Image (cartoon, grey):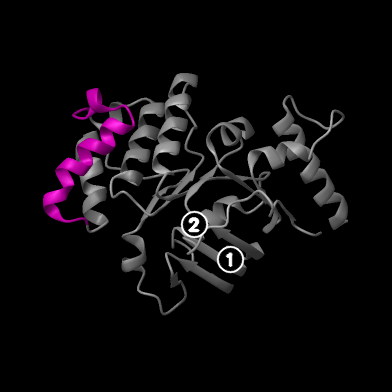
Amino acid sequence: MRTVRAAETAPTLHPWAVHAEGLRVRAGRHMAVDGLDLALGTGVHGLLGPNGAGKTTLMRALATVLRPAGGRLELLGQQVDARTDLRRVRRGLGYLPQQFGFYPRFTVREFVEYMAWLKEMPKQAVPGATQRAIERVGLAAKAEARMKTLSGGMLRRAGIAQAIVNDPAVLLLDEPTVGLDPEQRLDFRELLRDVGTDSCVLVSTHLVEDVVAACTDVVMVNEGRLVFQGTPADLTSQGADGDAGDSPAERGYSALLRRHRAAAR
């Protein structure tokens, strides 16, 4: 199926922070990302797709957790392959996976400081950067609380804090709003807009409305391939009254998915 692109409205930004051509990535024995072309610049990009579409595998490849099995991947102007020194690339990345590990007895501050150290931030910059990150996610009052005492939503915010502590040029967030209440989701959207003014942010989510509200660009994948890339308005325009969904954006999403599946038969 031909990829739907909204070239007349989508921004053209160079150099690309993320650039993939024919990217192929395995998840175990399965080729979860299979021939994907993608170019992302500054801004907030929402990643949509059904379960099993390859979203998490793509995020893990962009986070350099998984190596490409084929095609070409460039992050921050550097090609990522078997010969790449990943430490240099990773200094410019922030990543929140769906499930992240932590030492339960660490305080929130200790956890974020530890992650800053792992990202090889200058020692003198860590305390100030840690405090700013904790404040930006609304956890200043819990900075000295142990991680094991936090609620699910607070843990997610601590995870976001470690992802942004190094002011990354590329920020990758996989299902970041899980566990957040409606007020916290509104605050998170504002944080995304702020970070996206001078960074490339990619947010994977099932919540189409969060993408429409917070993102400048929408990327939709299915079966490991790019189905659509354009603005939220472009996504909305793909649907009609008879399509499934409770909002114009959801109807646009379901219409794209239905057409892609029909063409693949």
Asked if disc 1 and disc 2 are in contact, CB closer than 8 Å, the reply is yes
Secondary structure at badge 2 equals: helix
Q: Quadrant of the C terminus?
A: bottom right
> Image point 47% across, 52% down: which residue?
42
Classed neighbour count for the residue bearing mark 2: other residues with Cα under 10 Å, few (<14), some (14–19), many (≥20): many
Q: Main secondary structure of the magenta part?
A: helix
Q: Which x, y percent locates residue 20?
A: 57, 66
Residue stretch rendered in magenta on the structure: 121-145
Q: Is residue 178 left or right of residue 220?
A: left
- Relative placement, left or right, of 28 versus 193 is right
Q: Position of residue 113 (x, y in %)?
A: 21, 45
- Establish if 256 lies above or below 179: below
Query: What residue appears at the point 45 percent right and 19 percent down from the top-left corner?
Result: 183
Q: Which residue is mark 1?
A: 25
Judge left or right: residue 2 versus residue 119. Answer: right
Question: Quadrant where the N terminus lies?
Answer: bottom right
State the SS at label 1.
Answer: strand
Residue type at the position of mark 2: Arg
* Sequence-first disc among 1 and 2: 1
* Residue 67 can be seen, yes or no: no
Image coords of residue 236 (percent x, y): 72, 36
Q: Residue furthest front?
A: 8
Q: Which mark is residue 60?
A: 2
Residue kind at label 1, given as amino acid type: Val
Q: Is residue 201 magenta?
A: no
Q: Is residue 164 visible?
A: yes
